Image (tube, grey):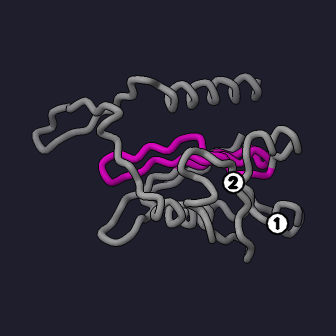
Amino acid sequence: MKNIIKILIIILISTSCNSQDRTATRTNENRNQIPLNKNQYDKIPLSEIKEIFKLAIDLPELQQYFHTDQFPARVPLKILEFGDVNENSLKGLMKFKQPINLITKEEIENNQIQDYLGVGDWSPVNGKLRLQLYYPIEGITINYMFEKGSKSWKIIDSVIFEE
């Protein structure tokens, strides 16, 4: 049953992330609904992606799932490349006093790696970012909502779902 639910969630995420005509809705001051198309989605500068990921991986509630004391092979932290989430944008990002390791899908498949963070959703709209990460080895999904302040990003909401 858990596998069926996993498959359905993956299909749902893939479908929503790969949609050709992505739409969402925002509300203006008059409370009228204005459709958003993919051209109105924000582009986050590469220089800010590292800041966002640092906040995401340092989320206090997430730390209990890393289990690096019991499983030292989980260090360095591995992150699956995803679009602009790559070696260039995350260069110098540290976790557990070591640089994080960016890996590809091929590396995951060839080496049967399960202790990595993957991106399930990256949706920036109107100065906010919805980020979803998953950590297969622990069976968790983390949903974040970030907001761009005057100088930096901050987490305004987060939820961790366990399988």
Q: Residue at x 54, y 25 (%)?
A: 15
Residue 112: image quadrant is top right
Amino acid type, mark 1 = Thr
Is residue 50 shown to the viewer in this render?
Answer: yes
Indicate which disc residue 68 carries. 1
Check the picture and name the quadrant holding the C terminus: top right
The picture places residue 94, in percent across and down from the top left corner, at 67, 71
Q: Is residue 52 left or right of residue 112?
A: left
Let me know if residue 117 is in the magenta part. yes
Q: Is residue 144 above or below residue 10?
A: below
Q: Residue furthest bottom?
A: 97
Q: Which residue is the site of mark 2?
A: 79
Nearer to us in this view, 107 or 9 = 107
Report x, y in % for residue 59: 59, 64
Q: Nearer the viewer, mark 1 or mark 2?
A: 2
**Amino acid at pointer 2:** Ile
Badge 2 marks a residue whose secondary structure is: strand
- x, y percent for residue 28: 17, 42
Q: Is residue 161 left or right of residue 107?
A: left
**Residue 8 shown in magenta:** no
- Magenta highlight range: 115-143
The residue under the point 61% across, 24% down is 11
Q: Earlier in the sequence, mark 1 or mark 2?
A: 1
**Residue beneath the point at 54% across and 64% down:** 50
